[in-house]
Amino acid sequence: MDMTPPTHPATPFGVDRKRFYDTIAAHSMTPLWEVLHALVPQAPATPCVPALWKYADVHPYLMQSGQLITAEEAVRRVLILENPGLRGRSSITQSLYAGLQVIMPGEIAPSHRHTQSALRFVIEGHGAYTAVDGERTQMKPGDFIITPSWTWHDHGHQGRVESDAPVVWLDGLDIPMLQFFDAGFAENGHATSQAVTKPEGMSTHRYGANMLPMRYDAPFGRTSPIFSYPYERTREALHELENHADIDAWDGVKLRYVNPATGGSPMPTMATFMQRLPAGFEGKPYRQTDGAVFSVVEGSGSVDIQGAGKTWSFDFGPQDHFVIPSWHTAKLRSQPGCVLFSFSDRPVHQALGIHREERLP
Ligand code: GTQ
């Protein structure tokens, strides 16, 4: 006779719950009532935690990775920014991937394509290009560049002399989302660099002059036909708005990048933003369901983040990166003023009708 005491109280019918769970486990079944609160939480309870990557800490490792492996062997020489709450999952939030990619003068990151969408946000260096669908675009610090889903793309650095500096950019991809949906496909190109079939700037002329072709053909499906959003234009817009328009008490001056053909986000899975906090800005607290990744472009500031009964306080400067998880309250501050790039999975929340945002007093 089994004398082990029951781990759960016996039911009124004399059946031990644990023994029942063990019995049904053999049939690949499990009781909802043990997990209901976790499955249907009162508010998001993400394992993703706030985190900061200071560029001064990260930079030496990026340079060392340049001595460790070539871009060609690595295919993409990237150090992943992995959320401390999601180690081993190559994710910065539950749905998003972020990494810092390094390319040395003369190197090529070979052509491939995949269903994952990618954004590039250039952190430092000059002389690199990215090629998408036969058109190259130069990468300059602060530029936001898109690699649409399933388009051939390769990256290169045209500098040849040793004094030329490496180029570093932030990669933001929807990798965890496509993993979740089991919808990832990829192919390698036949040539290392794809053939250049269009002069540089063609997509900007065709789609980026506040005009569209007469019979708009959506060359990249649901992704923006413009794949480069140069910093100089974004910077000037924010600067003029800061000087001549109202400052939002939560965001400072914040604009979202758009697909000019739809007014929606540049990619179906990721939204991108650029904001300027004026000197002396003391932002009000806000929270939103879309966890967001930030890249500091200019200036410095701090962010207070609250969630799960804890508080984090990060001081940030140029080229630092940080993440604000879903439904964590964030408050931005800047003494000298600063410019922040960010991206999130907001378009997916909005498409599903589950996006929530609170702007607190
Ligand atoms: O440049 O294609 O950081 O495929 C991760 C996966 C970059 C890229 C990443 C990728 C790429």
Image (cartoon, rainbow, N blue to C red):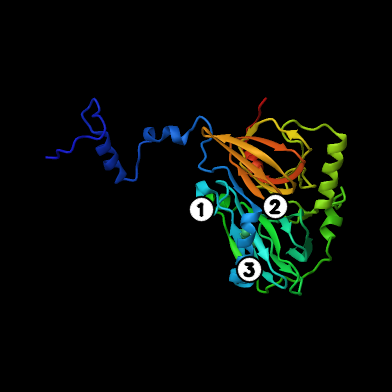
Does residue 23 sit above or below 199 in this rendering? above
> Which callout, 1 or 2, points to the residue nearer the camera?
2
Q: Secondary structure at mark 3?
A: helix
Picture residue at 56% right of the left edge, 54% below the top: 183
Q: Relative to residue 107, is residue 181 depicted above or below?
A: above
The disc placed on residue 89 is: 1
Question: Mark 2 near ligand 1 (CB under 8 Å)?
Answer: no
Q: Residue at point 55% right, 46% down?
A: 94
Residue holding disc 3: 66
Q: Regarding mark 1 in the picture, which secondary structure is present there?
A: loop
Q: Is residue 84 above or below residue 59?
A: above
Q: Residue 121: horizontal and vertical position, in percent?
A: 71, 54
Residue 114 visible to an observer of this rendering: no
- The kind of residue on which mark 3 rests is Gly
Q: Which residue is mark 2?
A: 319
Q: Amino acid at mark 1?
A: Arg
Counting residues from the start of the chain, the first of labels 3 and 1 encountered is: 3
Q: Residues within 10 Å of mark 3 (few under 14, many from 20)?
A: some
Mark closer to the observer (3, 1): 3
Q: Residue at x 50, y 42 (%)?
A: 47
